[in-house]
Amino acid sequence: MPDLFPDSASVQDGELAVGGIPVSSLAEEFGTPLVVYCRESLQARARAYREAAPSARILYSVKAFPNVALLRLFADEGLGAEVSALGELEFALRAGIPGDRIVVDGNNKSDEEIRGAAAAGASFVVDAPDDLARAQAAGIRGDVLVRVTPGIDAETHDAIRTGHTGSKFGLPPDEALEVIRQGGVTGLHVHIGSQLLDFGAERMTVEWLAAFAARCRAEAGWTPRLVDLGGGLGIRYLADDSRLEVRDFVRALVASTQDAWRLHELPEPELILEPGRSLVGDAALTVYRVGVVKPLRGTTYVAVDGGMSDNPRPQLYGARFTAALAGRFDEPTDGSYTVCGKHCESGDVLIERVALPQPRRGDLLVLPSTGAYTLGMASNYNGVPKPAAVLVGDGDARLIRRRETVEDLLALESG
């Protein structure tokens, strides 16, 4: 299991440490629940993308975890940002990312969001038939790409499959071609889904997109200067999950694009990639404090001080995680336990079954691979404030998102 943890994770005197700092010290200083990001892991993932595709634009998909400090770290590594709402755009701009390294997409953009994209000088993704006219009226200055739906079913959960026929995202080929004929479009955009651990669907997508580009040339006299292949590379959540390394995935993607474009005698386009989960997902872990340990008819529940409010993915997608006791990392397991949260839902279960040493009240329980779509999708269910997040490296811990308080929640009330 240790290889599921961030790159800087180690065991010191039986206790888990990240970035050279024992988890117990982090919990004492910052409280729990706490999301701990490893700087070494974040930099390594970003560099893997840059090295595998040095001429491509690599954009962090901000939805994975909107955070100014992480965006600044990625900007220092040469990455831009992919955003799909006005708030995400503002995160990117406050991190100092210039508009020419930002792509704005989304299936239902408001007038305010389109004006924001225009003001920032960002590139813009057409996702609906009237998006192009609205963008041009707003004065879009960046590149304009049309998102096309290839009708390819990725092998992933239905909720994060986006390239299939009937998806709410993008335009069917005929409608995309009609938009291209209107003029002002410089590229194509496609994204087939998230948490992909097999390259087959991506290869099919690239080959399909090249054939569509050849059709655009034949029927409209237009070829894309830019091709945005989206993101989607998955990570391991459990020890027996398959692994697809960033460098292998990206190199295969670049080679497949070159081959497909060459096959249709098309000029090679500039590539844009939009990784999210594969940049931050396995670069973080969440630390909880164990409370009630309750044996009930063959199931022993281990309740922690968070749950579905800070990590809704088990409830939304059936996402599976594993866990360990940070302070007793080397101890042998003695049974199987169900890790549940503190919320008023029977479905507030983070892990159905995990082998642990006998948990005790006060133990620190850690879940690896929680850096993506956890805090980014967190809620305040039961009036629970959202956790803090820290960035650790070389023995230093820096708060990058403070813990919410009940006063923060009440500050939004009126009347």
Image (cartoon, rainbow, N blue to C red):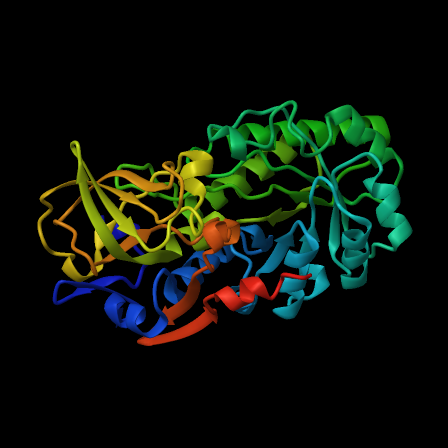
The residue depicted at 82 percent of the width and 34 percent of the height is 129
101 or 348, which is in the foreground? 348
326 or 348, which is in the foreground? 348
* Residue 260, horizontal then vertical, whole percent: 61, 32
Q: Give the answer, above or below, for where 14 lies relative to 128.
A: below
The residue depicted at 31 percent of the width and 76 percent of the height is 395
Left or right: 305, with 81 as reference point: left
Quadrant in the picture for residue 230: top right
Left or right: 142, with 158 as reference point: right
Q: Give the answer, above or below, for where 378 lies relative to 181.
A: below
* Residue 163, horizontal then vertical, whole percent: 60, 30
The residue depicted at 47 percent of the width and 28 percent of the height is 155
Asked if residue 196 shows in the view, the reply is no
41 or 325, which is in the foreground? 325
Q: Give the answer, above or below, for where 167 lies relative to 85.
A: above
Asked if residue 272 shows in the view, the reply is yes
352 or 279, which is in the foreground? 352
* Residue 40, horizontal then vertical, whole percent: 38, 65
